[in-house]
């Protein structure tokens, strides 16, 4: 879908499909050869939102700093590589129905998620007077994204009920349109290392006095492997690994975020951290799965080299009431579960990468 078509789709959803004759000029800023940000062309006061985004590759950081400077000086339309779009209905959106309480409409600054079956637009609502982002609206662009956005709303409601402090708060949910509004967590993105602050964040996800076991998951994984994998050698590898994990020893249960990554962590101005994007979260998950995801997803995205990380986890595991001897097994559970998820989502390239990593684990465990 063309970027202009996506932008118009977002605002059409926000004004509840009503027609509009008013247009505004936006600039599509690319990332990895695709439009990643849609910035209003004549709004120099959006600098605080742009400062909250931190790319991880060196050349991307340099480019993003230049984009911020161009936006600040009103020259964003002249920046090399951007596309200028005329977008319909930006001021006609039904902001009040989405929880916006100011008399003046916000400045919408849009981040476009990664293309795929669950793509969404994240619309930052910036106050015109202060330049402060007051809220974030999630607009799903596919049917699967609708399910994910509403699941996150349910998770955030549950977290609020448990008085969890390190997540956004829901401000509004339109269950019919599958659009949610939540608080904006101001701060810089997290670093690529599992810092002590990040371990504290992981410890905050533990559920007091609740336990789970590997055996609860092993049977489900076995059935799913047989039903979803059409690659017998890899299927045999996965089943063999699962059979080594049938253990009913109690493990501390936790909220499993599901996408615990540097870019989903915000380092807050008060020195603490918060977690964004709870669309893959589940309650009573196994411990250390988020910690392993943090490292293995970066192996895939940045290094492209299968690596085992159990040896790095001993101190963190103790802080989460996990016996260090159980850490290698919990790494295997992460690899199996992630492999099966990739098969479900037809992400076969990463599934192959994970199967190679699991083969490393099997050789080391032998």
Image (cartoon, rainbow, N blue to C red):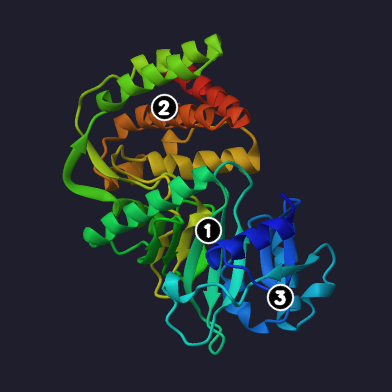
Give the camera-side residue of 139 and 131: 139
Q: Earlier in the sequence, mark 3 or mark 2?
A: 3
CB-based contact (under 8 Å), mark 3 and mark 2: no
Q: Residue at x 73, y 64 (%)?
A: 28
Look at the picture and state if 315 lies above or below 236: below
Q: Which residue is mark 2?
A: 332
CB-based contact (under 8 Å), mark 2 and mark 1: no
Which residue extends farthest left?
209
Look at the picture and state if 50 lies above or below 218: below
Label 1 SS:
strand
Q: Which residue is mark 3?
A: 24
Q: Earlier in the sequence, mark 2 or mark 1?
A: 1
The percent coordinates of residue 324 (x first, y second) are 31, 35
Mark number displayed over residue 139: 1
The percent coordinates of residue 157 (x first, y second) are 29, 58
CA gap between label 3 and label 1 equals 19 Å
Drawn side of residue 202 relative to residue 13, left or right: left
Look at the picture and state if 314 lies above or below 110: above
Q: Of discs 3 and 2, which sits in the foreground?
A: 3
CA gap between label 3 and label 2 equals 50 Å
Q: Residue at x 84, y 74 (%)?
A: 78
Q: Quadrant of residue 161?
A: bottom left
How many residues crowd mark 3 within 10 Å: few (<14), some (14–19), many (20+)?
Answer: some
Q: Quadrant of residue 109?
A: bottom right
Q: Quadrant of residue 60?
A: bottom right
């Amino acid at each position: 879908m063309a970027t202009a078509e996506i932008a118009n789709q977002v605002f059409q959803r926000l004004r509840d499909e009503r027609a509009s004759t008013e247009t505004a000029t936006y600039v599509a800023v690319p990332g990895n050869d695709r439009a990643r940000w849609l910035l209003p062309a004549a709004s120099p006061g959006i600098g605080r939102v742009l400062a909250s985004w931190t790319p991880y590759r060196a050349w991307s950081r340099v480019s993003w700093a230049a984009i911020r400077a161009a936006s600040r000086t009103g020259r964003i339309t002249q920046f090399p590589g951007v596309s200028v779009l005329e977008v319909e209905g930006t001021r006609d959106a039904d902001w009040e129905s989405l929880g916006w309480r100011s008399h003046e409409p916000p400045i919408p600054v849009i981040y476009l998620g990664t293309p795929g079956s669950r793509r969404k637009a994240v619309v930052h609502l910036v106050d015109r007077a202060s330049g402060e982002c007051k809220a974030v609206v999630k607009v799903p662009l596919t049917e699967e994204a609708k399910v994910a956005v509403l699941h996150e709303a349910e998770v955030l409601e549950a977290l609020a009920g448990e008085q969890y402090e390190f997540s956004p708060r829901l401000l509004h949910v339109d269950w019919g349109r599958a659009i949610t509004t939540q608080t904006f967590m101001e701060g810089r993105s997290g670093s690529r290392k599992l810092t002590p602050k990040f371990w504290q964040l992981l410890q905050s996800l533990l559920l007091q006095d609740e336990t789970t076991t590997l055996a609860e998951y092993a049977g489900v994984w076995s059935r799913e492997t047989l039903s979803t994998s059409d690659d017998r050698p890899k299927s045999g590898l996965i089943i063999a690994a699962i059979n080594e994990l049938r253990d009913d020893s109690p493990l501390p249960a936790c909220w499993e975020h599901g996408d615990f990554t540097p870019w989903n962590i915000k380092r807050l101005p008060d020195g603490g951290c918060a977690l964004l994007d709870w669309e893959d979260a589940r309650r009573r998950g196994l411990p250390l799965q988020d910690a392993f995801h943090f490292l293995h997803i970066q192996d895939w995205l940045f290094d492209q080299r299968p690596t085992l990380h159990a040896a790095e986890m001993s101190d963190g595991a103790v802080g989460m009431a996990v016996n260090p001897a159980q850490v290698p097994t919990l790494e295997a559970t992460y690899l199996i579960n992630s492999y099966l998820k990739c098969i479900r989502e037809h992400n076969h390239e990463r599934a192959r990468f994970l199967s190679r990593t699991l083969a490393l684990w099997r050789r080391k465990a032998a």
